Amino acid sequence: MSTWQKLLHFLKTNPIFTRVIPFNSQFRMYWDFLIIALSLWVCFTTPLDIAFEPLTFKLSYIVLFNQIIDILFILDIVINFRTSIADFITGDEITDSKTIAI
């Protein structure tokens, strides 16, 4: 078995990677609030950084914080693909990963 096949088998059998997050879960609500807060931070700091280039945005902890925000935004994309959706016609919760991705 090749390395890729082992990795694919691990991802398909591990419950952390096969579980779908309910769209109305408390975790999802807190996650969305976090993403909104981080989006507001980026919304205000990016134009200031581009227009005025203040030295405070060049400090190492601000740069690190912005890089962590970028990683969290990428993680948000992954979480969105692992979150269930509601069917608009029937109102049922759709938990099939392939249907969610479409």
Image (cartoon, rainbow, N blue to C red):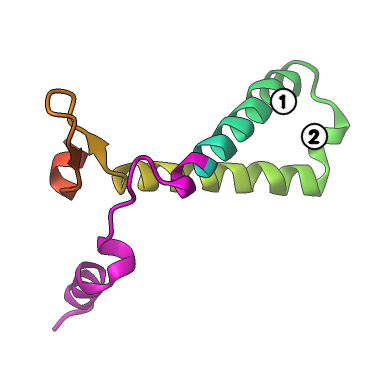
Pinpoint residue 82: horizontal percent, then vertical percent. 30, 49
In the depicted structure, whether residue 27 falls above or below residue 24? below
Q: Which residue is mark 2?
A: 57
Pinpoint residue 88: horizontal percent, then vertical percent. 18, 24
Looking at the image, the residue that sits furthest to the right is 55
In the image: residue 80, left or right of residue 8? right
The tally of labels here is 2
The amino acid at mark 2 is: Phe
Picture residue at 38% right of the left edge, 40% below the top: 24
Quarter of the image where the C terminus is located? top left
The magenta span reads 1-29
Q: Quadrant of residue 8?
A: bottom left
Looking at the image, the residue that sits furthest to the top is 51
Q: Which residue is mark 1?
A: 45
The amino acid at mark 1 is: Thr
Q: Secondary structure at mark 1?
A: helix
Looking at the image, the residue that sits furthest to the bottom is 1
